[in-house]
Image: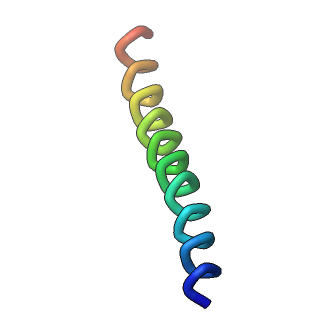
Amino acid sequence: MQNNNADVSKLRVPQLTTLVIYHCYSIISKLRVPQLT
């Protein structure tokens, strides 16, 4: 069980980071578009 949980945590961290980066990137892109236009 401990090893299984450790694997899950290792898999969750990259997914959360990628989601956060993607979310922030989408917000930044939305903020940049009105400024450029």
Q: So how many labels did they put on this image?
A: 0
Name the foreground residue: 1 vs 35: 1
Q: Is residue 23 above or below residue 26?
A: below
* Picture layout, residue 26 above or below residue 2: above
Q: State the residue lying farthest toward the bottom.
A: 1
Position of residue 34 in the picture relative to residue 16 (left or right): left
Q: Split into 4 quadrants, where in the image is the C terminus?
A: top left
Check the picture and name the quadrant holding the N terminus. bottom right
- Give the vertical position of 9 relative to 25 (above or below): below
Image height of 18 relative to 32, above or below: below
Judging depth in this view, the residue of 7 and 31 nearest the camera is 7
Q: Residue at x 60, y 72 (%)?
A: 8
Q: Position of residue 5 (x, y in %)?
A: 57, 80
Q: How are the colours assigned in the image?
A: rainbow
Residue 4 picture quarter? bottom right
Position of residue 10 measured from the top left corner of the image (x, y, whole percent): 55, 62
Q: Quadrant of residue 27?
A: top left
14 displayed left or right of 30? right
**Residue at horizontal 52 percent and vertical 40 percent from the top:** 22
Q: Residue furthest front?
A: 3
Residue 26's spot in the image, x, y percent? 49, 36
Q: Residue at x 41, y 9 (%)?
A: 36
**Viewer-proximal residue, 1 or 28?**
1
